[in-house]
Structures are given as C-alpha cells and as structure tokens.
Amino acid sequence: MTEIREDEYLDPADGLIHCRKCGGSRQTVIPDPFKGGTFKPRCVCPCQQEAERRRREAEKRRQRIERIRRRKAQGLQDRYLYGYTFANDNGGNPVMAKAHAYVDHWPQAFKRNIGLLLFGDVGTGKSFLAGCIANALLDRDVPVLMTNFPTILARLCGTFGEDRTAFLDSLGDYDLLIIDDLGVERNTEYALEQMFSIIDSRYRCNKPLIVTTNLKLDELKNPPDLAHARIYDRILERCAPILFAGKNFREDNAASTKAAARQIITPPTASHRQTVTEKGEL
C-alpha cells in the first residue's frame, strides 16, 4: 500500500491520494496491459508542478548570473572597466545615445557584422563608451572581450605552437571584440603582422569589432605604409566611424580629484580646530 504523507489525504470519492494544499491528485490510474486490471502510480499535483517550475527558473537565474560573472571576469580583464556603465554616465557626452542604440539593436548589428570606430582626441570618452557597450552586452549574457593590442602582443610573446594558435582562436569565441587605444602599440614589423592577423581573423569569422583610437580619420584613410593600410582598410570596411569632438572629460575628472584632495590634505586653521574640538568631533 502506498504511504500517505502528512500533506496528503486519501479521497474516498476516487480512492486516490490527493494534495492537502491544492486538492490535486498525487496518484493516477493506469491500465496494466500485461496482468490486466489497473495500478496506481504516483504523479505530481499542480502545486508540486508549480514548485518545480519555480525551482528550475531559480536555478536558471543562478546559472545565468554565474555565467555572466565568469564572462565579465574573462572579458573585462582590467577591473576599472567594471565602472564603465550606462548607470555611471554623467550625461555630458551626446554621443552616448549611439551606444544605447547599438546595444538596443545588437541582434541586428551582430547578424550584419556591424562594428564601430570611435575616434577623437584624448579624454573625450571613447573608452568609457566602449566599456558601457561591453558591460551592457555582458549583462545580457553576450560574450564580449575588451582589450588592447599591447596586452594581446604581450600574451603572444609568451606562447608558442598550439598554445599560440589556441589563444588566437579564442579571440574568435567572443561575439564582440573591443580593441581599445589603437595606435599606442609599438609599430614593429612583428606587431603590425600580429595586428593584421587578429583584425583579418575577425573579418573572416564575420563577427563585429569595436575600435577606439586617438588617430584622426584622415590618418586612418591615408596610412603611412602598406602594413598599416592592410589593418586600417579592414577596420574602415566593417566599423562605422563616430567622432568624439567634445571636451576632455579627463581634465574635468582631474580637476575634481584635485579639489577633493585639497579638502583631505589641507590642514585646518586654528579657529577651525578649536570649533571642531568644542563640538567633540576630535
């Protein structure tokens, strides 16, 4: 005889075990095709089904959160990039609207392999905008890597053979690759060859690329030599150029930092010290 649990009861109307909470059946009647007659196996009542659904959804959310955490750890290798988010935008850069639009239309951008070329003077917010896009897409569980060529080249210098190939191939695993500060790397023959290899690989795997640079658009369109031309041509073909021509936000940040520092390190006057002491704050 099937054991009846504390949250169950036997309904005399049908002779089956039911749930005390929802009244649903926790037993069902199935014909026995071999021995004849019937048997009454356990089944799941509606409230048990709902509880299992909620448990599965909670587990999916937990797995998604953990997956996003791992993606961020891999894709944002510099911790300061975690703060490059739309929530931290001060609203002073009108170009930021384009970043929101790019994220909102990411499925189309990904499908059509549309990237961005963010160019302009130092400190105008190019890296911040790129980081906002990276964080927003990572929060949507999209694989993104934001890095720069000096970091990539340093990694390549320490790898050989299969490890080197595996590392280069891994760059293609990301749905979006962001190369920050193009043009700050050393322009050696080796560096330029590796840069072209990475950009060309991205081009051939048909996945979007975002590049930030302090170079002027005219410099990109009129490169000094063939090695640079091969790289810039690939970028210009797949990345829509966006000019950053606003004020230097780094100068504003530096001024704010200096003002805050003065408040911290400037010794108080004698009258101020006396007032503070009288208030019992020291």
Image (cartoon, helix red, strand yellow):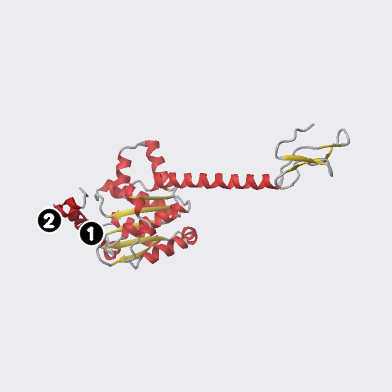
Q: Residues within 10 Å of mark 1 (few under 14, many from 20)?
A: few
Viewer-nearest residue: 250 or 77: 250
Q: Quick one: label 2, few (<14), some, or many (20+) residues within 10 Å?
A: few
Mark 2, residue position: 271
Rendered position, 183 above or below 217 = above
Place of residue 199 in the rendered image (x, y in percent of width and height, measured from the top left): 37, 52
- Disc number at residue 230? none
Q: Residue at x 44, y 45 (%)?
A: 69
Q: Indicate the position of residue 175 as horizontal and vertical percent values.
A: 45, 52
- In the rendered image, the quadrant that contains the N terminus is top right
Residue lying at the far top in this picture: please name it.
1
User: Which residue is most to the left?
Assistant: 270
Q: Check the image and name the residue furthest to the front.
A: 278
Question: Is 24 displayed left or right of 222 in the figure?
Answer: right
Q: Which residue has dot 1 on it? A: 256
Measured as percent of width and height from the top left, residue 263 is found at: 19, 55
| Residue 266 visible within the image | no
Q: Does residue 67 appear anywhere in the picture? A: yes
The residue nearer to you, when weighing 278 against 18, is 278
Residue 226, picture quadrant: bottom left
Residue type at mark 2? Ser
| Dot placed on the residue nearer the N-terminal end, 2 or 1 | 1
Residue 225 in the image: above or below residue 6: below
**Compared to 187, does 242 lie above or below?**
below
Residue 219 x %, y % = 26, 63
Secondary-structure class at tag 1 = helix
